[in-house]
Amino acid sequence: MEKEKTKHKLIIIGSGPAGYTAAIYAGRASLAPVLFTGQEPGGQLATTTDVENYPGFPSGIQGPELMQQFREQASRFGTEVVDASVDRVDFSKKPFEIYSSNKQYQTDAVIVSTGASAMWLDLESEQRLRGRGVSACATCDGFFFKDKDVVVIGGGDVAMEDAIFLTKFAKSVQVVHRRDELRASQIMQDRAKANSKISFVWNTEVKDVLGEQDVTGIRVINNKTNEESEIACQGLFVLIGHKPNTDIFKGQLALDKKGYLVLKEKTATSVAGVFGAGDVHDHAYRQAITAAGFGCMAAIDAERWLESGE
Amino acid sequence: MQEKIFTDQNFKEEVESVKGVVLVDFWAPWCGPCKMQGPIIESLAKEVENATVGKLNVDENAETAGKFGVMSIPTLILFKDGKPVESMVGLHQKDDLKAKIDEIAK
């Protein structure tokens, strides 16, 4: 079967702040970019409630609302937003080839802004009980745990924010963390520690999620004493960080040991004409504003590269 | 077809007594990914002819959400001849959903 084939100047993969900002700049530069929204349209902000540190919104803004505005702004300047995932890329060909939903897209330049996705504990019981008490989105699922006991796994900003959010519904929130200190920013730590419904279980790792049909608790091990115990809970929120979405680029673009996209000069990747932006590369800052900044840089770099006619 | 709005009141008639395939998107206004899923469901409803597609707000229709054990949203449940046959947790793109519908509608 002959595949449907289209040719473009620039394709942007990913729909977080980096991807949409790149699209706004590239659109204004008349590159008519195509943007693929991927498995998680809007990226990590789509599951965030209050965004309090994005400049221009002094009283804060909801994550999904912010991303909707990014999308509208990108569309306004001629970006074609495709609600699909990219299945495969071939950067060894010129023009580059990108495959999505059985269609082939050819393009002169690419911006990779696929971001990072929430990690799971990788336990069989965890995956079996997803949607039955195991969740990675407190703002989505907190509602189902009114007057229940819940556990949050993790020690970063997202874990603290979500633990605090869950106290609106849950009877108790226990934060289980594998170290004896949190990675979260001081302001989030202070807020969480000041909340009377939140308690902390230190130096503790999850061995198993308990329950046949629904979550009834977790089996944990103290990594200092090796002592095992069980914590009863009806909800388990896994908020242990993120991993870069670079599986489809393996063997084609240089990645570091943890799978993050390596940038050589400015936003250039190991393949000329392919640029990177946002959390797919950046594990140091990981902010909406830094991702947006990177997206802008990648768009300008791509535009210059296209103009130079290399 | 336009997307349907399912409720505790009409669920029996509009889903459980229907011959064929019905896709129900369990959602709520305060859920970020649900807001991303919403427009996808709306456009899916217009494009498919072999299934009825609609949404149920879990906040206002807790009885039905509870009956089908929904504890995470968005959850998308496919019904065939009134019985739930497949439950999908989390955000799903249109093409994936079309493929599932086609598989079940066969």
Image (tube, coloured by chain):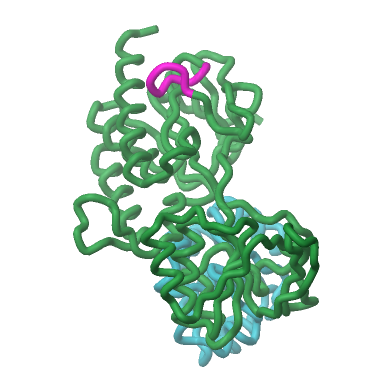
The number of numbered discs placed on residues in the rendered structure image is 0
Residue appearing at x 61%, y 33% in the figure: A259
Question: At x 50% / y 36%, what residue is drawn?
Answer: A280
Q: What residue lies at 40% left-to-right and 23% top-to-bottom?
A: A267
In the picture, which chain is cyan?
A: B
* Quarter in which the N terminus of chain A is drawn: top right
Question: Residue A238 colored magenta?
Answer: no
- Residue most toward the front? A225
Residue A264 within the segment the image draws in magenta? yes
- Picture quadrant of residue A53: bottom left
Relative side of A269 to B82, left or right: left
Residue A33: x, y in percent? 36, 32
**Which residue is more in the foreground, B67 or B100?**
B67
Q: Which residues are magenta?
A: A263-270
Q: Residue furthest bottom?
A: B9
Predominant secondary structure, magenta span: loop
**Residue A72 sits above or below residue A216 on the image:** above
Residue B106 visible in the shown view: no
